[in-house]
Image (cartoon, rainbow, N blue to C red):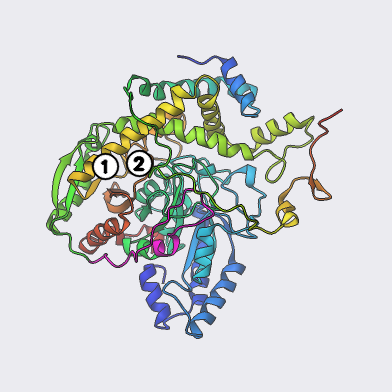
Amino acid sequence: MALERSDVEKVAHLARLKIEENDIPEYTRNLTSILELVNQMQAVDIEGTDPLAHPLDATQRLRHDEVTESDQREHFQQNAPAKEAGLFLVPKVIE
Amino acid sequence: MHNKTIAELAKGLADGEFSSVELTRHFLGRIDALDSQYNSFITVTPEQALAQAEAADATRAAGNAKTLTGIPIAHKDIFCTNGVLTTCASKMLSNFIAPYDATVVEKFNATGMVSLGKTNMDEFAMGSSNENSFFGAVKNPWDTNAVPGGSSGGSAAAVAARLAPGATGTDTGGSIRQPAAFCGITGLKPTYGRVSRWGMIAYASSLDQGGPMARTAEDCALLLNEMAGFDPKDSTSLKKAVPDYTADLNQPLSGLRIGLPKEYFGKELSAEMSEAIMAAVKEFEKLGATVQEISLPNTMLAIPSYYIIAPAEASSNLSRFDGVRYGYRCDNPENLEDLYKRSRGEGFGKEVQRRILVGTYALSEGYYDAYYRKAQRIRRLIQQDFLNAFNEVDLIMGPTTPTAAFDLGSNTDDPVQMYMEDIYTLAVNLAGLPGISVPAGLINGRPVGLQILAGHFKESQLLNAAHQFQTATNWHQLAPNAGQ
């Protein structure tokens, strides 16, 4: 089941990943061989087997809806590439 | 001092043979003098380390020292360290100063341990050779033409070269055990949920687990005592009391039942590796254990199952790196979509991009059941194999890796071939089991690791077996020339 160049371009768009034009053939080959590897799974009969998400089948804990953290906006925004007045700056979205 | 184990260093500190400041200066001096050969550290933090060492000495003078107070350690650069660069070996985070400490780091700090710095790794923990680092490959201290393994390759190399007496690592598919094997040290991957993942940059959340890397099983037990425990900040952390992991180290092994999976001794295993592992198993027989062949019939399915689950979870986890709130941002984005796409395209390396693409494909519309769901079902079959085996035996043993460390640059053309390197380690993460790799010989001067597996939460049993093996053998005491 060989992937086409267009499949890789579509997936890259879904992942919001700009891949270099001349890397596309390599990624197409890599992805095809990875998918061939994982297609070994398709022959296995897993009828009646439940999926395993947590190795000890633990479920998500619930907690009381209480405020536990203090506001540290400035501290956390120190790593922001662009900010102003406590807001993250991005290119204009609405014309 | 650098040839002493953590247990010996702790005794030296307690007996007043040396201070934590002297110890810390000694290791900082070795990093400064020797690490240009190995590239095992991304960031060294001498000022912070010396301040922590001074504080540790003061705590000791006041009579409040705990076992590990004043012991220096290195952290894999996947653990967030407050105020210190935390890169995950990626260009994406090459400017990221963590604004908080990971729970594991906080626990080590609270006990008065000293952080020497942050170790190199495969970018976002994706790799088996440490060649996928934005900061360059790490070299194996036993042979600088060889890889140290990955993804915790910097931690393994730093411990092997005696640049740190111990280090933290993380293991998603073998990333503690495989580099420990390649570098001739001891590395423990705990049961999933045993060590908090909070502040540990996520790769595949249902598989990731932090653990200790050191020269001996006893040292790993001492470190795990500090790392383990329930954390309300990690939603998959488990509420279970933490035993003293050193308590059972000296239990005799008579009557211990060891299983050797026939699938782990197939044709992909080199003759030299098979010989070394069987010699190690013989030692356990001498210690009173019995050995039997077992079967883990779904072993080969671990690779396809893992290489869907891990990339799928990674593609979701790594969607947070968008160039907006922190991390790398491309120059002059034309619009928001261009900002996302170019920041991620320029910020992530090739292996990370490959796994994001595979994971996105596997989770995309129409493929979810055929890939992710199917892989999770196979995951249960793999776990069931282990649970069945543990009805018959106490521990499972085999090689950690099919071969000793391979040469730098030898495996990178074909990602699928590289994935095969992880055949013995991946299934353990899928099943959520604890596993340890202990030094068990040399092949052409490169170390070999014996992997020991136990049932969920049986870390004490693993450490007991590993410690008894290390009492009977001296493989763990061999040092690369760098260690002299």
Q: Amino acid at mark 2?
A: Ala
Q: Front-most of B198 and B337? A: B198
Q: Quadrant of the N terminus of chain A?
A: top left
Q: Position of residue B475 (x, y in %)?
A: 27, 57
- Pointer 2 and pointer 1 on the same chain: yes
Position of B5 with respect to B293 (left or right) is right
Position of B158 with respect to B292 (left or right) is right
Magenta-colored segment: predominant secondary structure: loop
Asked if the stretch drawn in magenta spans residue B76, the answer is: no
Q: Residues within 10 Å of mark 2 (few under 14, many from 20)?
A: many
Query: In this view, which residue lies farthest toward the bottom?
Result: B62
Residue B266 visible in rendering: yes
Residue at left 80%, top 46%?
Answer: A87
Q: Amino acid at mark 1?
A: Leu
As displayed, is residue B355 above or below residue B142? Answer: above
Residue corresponding to mark 1: B387
Asked if the stretch drawn in magenta spans residue B243, the answer is: yes
Residue at left 47%, top 40%?
Answer: B127
Q: CA distance from mark 2 to mark 1?
A: 9 Å
Q: Are marks 2 and 1 in contact (CB under 8 Å)?
A: yes
Q: Front-most of B259 and B448? A: B259
The magenta region covers B223-250
Q: Position of residue A84 (x, y in %)?
A: 83, 48
Q: Position of residue B33 (x, y in %)?
A: 52, 63
Residue B28 visible in rendering: no
Residue at left 46%, top 29%?
Answer: B413
Residue corresponding to mark 2: B431
